[in-house]
Amino acid sequence: MGLDLLRDKTGERRVVRGRLLVAGVIATVLFGLLAGRIAYLQIAQYDHFAAQSQDNRVRLAPVTPTRGLILDRDGRILAENRPAFRLTVIPEQVTDMDALLEELGGLIDLSPEDINAFEETRRRARGFQEIPLKLQLTDADVARLAVNRHRFPGVEVRPHLTRHYPYGEIGSHAVGYVGRISESELRDRDRRHYRGTSMIGKTGVERAYEDRLRGEMGLERIETNALGRPLSIIDREPPVPGDDIRLTLDIALQRVAEEALGDHRGAIVAMDPRTGGILALASKPGFDPNAISRGLDREAFRSLRGHPDQPLFNRALRGRYPPGSVVKPFLGLAGVASGHMDPDETVFCNGRYHLPNVSRTWRDWKPEGHGHVDLIQSVAQSCDIYYYDLAYQMGIDAVHDWMTRFGFGLETGIDLPGERKGVMPSREWKRDNLGEPWYQGETVNTGIGQGFTLATPIQLAASTAMFANRGAPVRPHLLETDEGGGVAPPLVAPLTLDDEALWQTAIDAMVEVVHGPRGTARAIGEDLDYRIAGKTGTAQVIGIAQDEEYEEDAIDERFHDHALFTAFAPATSPRIAVAVVVENGGSGSATAAPMARRVIDAWMERLEAQGELARGWR
């Protein structure tokens, strides 16, 4: 009872009331905050969360633009688009991707390449984007997938346009082909233009003019149900189709060039010397771009790449060959223009040539020699001794400087990817590349286009066109100039001679090759009612010792000489320049020259039929 008297009941009640008041205030504040937050979310943030709710049932889908057509000079379609079906997957709608791929593989044919490409694209794509799994579905594939559609949420069969090349193998290296974009290609491109379903130009014109042919990607917002099945398109940003482009190429002449090559490995380049427009660019063997664009399996593509004849290798732009005797008109003109030789001066050719104080013998292709020859006959009969001596008199530095003025050893700048430049050797070149000094005997070999000298067919065609134009260079190109922009300037400067009459002398020498009684290509001049200026060439693939004879039948075919021929026609007013290289074809006069004649004849007939030649041109 004494303890009860000591308690202060009034004080305790004040403490309790104070605590209740604080608790009430806290509760009121918390309730106010909660109410304010609810109001903020319900009113101020309504649009934001309504949009998020909408996004839960709206899927964004890229719309691939229609790729532009590729046409030849007469409007014939070289690359077009055809309807097809492909299989796509939306990863975010798939719970077990491995199980899905296994089930789909039991329903349709899925190659390891299809799956690898899908996984590579999936890694860089967003989950809501459709990713292609198989690019080309057969009608049977489409039917099986339609019946089993309910088993595969997130899987769609989509119609699309696939690239088709109506002429197949003809012109395949010039036109090129498209394929699925790779990770490395995507790193170098604007990702906005390339999404999961994108194809990209891999070679040829398809690659060179990818930005024009591609177009601009569109976008669809698609309403879907809970299973992801599309219900309707809410809105659509249409794609911008790619541009159609017209080429200078004539597919009919291209066919003639490839048929002329037949089963030989090699290349033929024909161009308009007035403009640089490529009329034909043939490389054999070729390939079927349709098979590659549809998607070859790994084994088939490996077989194609590993084929000993290299059908994917563009010999016209990347093949480098000793030019052999086709350099003789260029070197002869250079020797006369530089004062090392008079055009009427003769050199006695007995079939053998010796340098002072050197025991080695350089032989002429004709063992008994050609007798006394001047500039014209040295070209017409392709006398090696004349050019051994001329190169020695000029020296390698002067030879290099003059030949590069014609474009030898340089790129032409053609509007196709992958061009390689040739080799026009010099003292500096050998020191930088081989770490060795230059020897006089190497100058002698350079005089007939052998030794270290290398040239591509496109470079030979461009140099021949410059010769036909009497020193005015042109830049080779495939895009028609009226299809958007002009042609870039040539990579070599115009060549002006102190005596312009020398051009006519050099051209007369090339005319003598075809129309002269002793010309090396006189066989193709028979029954020819217009004049061709040409030059044959035969380039050794393997060296022959001084005491040995070249016996073609005794060595493997791939060690046979290369056959070359360069020409332009008509000689007085050129409308076509041609370069032919036939790997291991043997004689330039017997193998390459008739091929060039077929191509030139076909072009002359076309020009005459269309009335594009002046009266009396023959």
Image (cartoon, rainbow, N blue to C red):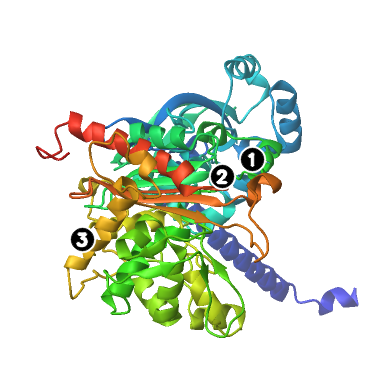
Across and down, in percent, residue 72 comes to: 31, 36
Residue type of the residue flagged with mark 2: Leu
- x 41%, y 58%: residue: 382
Question: Depth check: 354 or 82 in front?
Answer: 354
Dividing the picture into quarters, in which one does residue 89 lie?
top right
Q: Could you tell me if residue 52 is visible in this image?
A: no
Residue type of the residue flagged with mark 3: Gln
Residue highlighted by disc 3: 504
Across and down, in percent, residue 318 comes to: 50, 55
What is the distance, in whole Å, between disc 2 and disc 3 at their CAs? 40 Å
What is the distance, in whole Å, between disc 2 and disc 1 at their CAs? 7 Å
Residue highlighted by disc 1: 304
- x 38%, y 80%: residue: 398
Mark 1 or 3, which is nearer the eye? 3
Dividing the picture into quarters, in which one does residue 545 lie?
bottom right
Disc 2, disc 3: CB below 8 Å?
no
Disc 2, disc 1: CB below 8 Å?
yes
Question: Depth check: 83 or 529 in front?
Answer: 529
Q: Residues within 10 Å of mark 1 (few under 14, many from 20)?
A: some
Residue highlighted by disc 2: 312
Local SS, label 1: helix
Q: Residues within 10 Å of mark 3 (few under 14, many from 20)?
A: few
- Compare marks 2 and 1 and give the one earlier in the sequence: 1
Local SS, label 2: loop
Disc 1, disc 3: CB below 8 Å?
no
What is the distance, in whole Å, between disc 1 and disc 3 at their CAs? 47 Å
Residue type of the residue flagged with mark 1: Leu
Q: Could you tell me if residue 209 is visible in this image?
A: yes
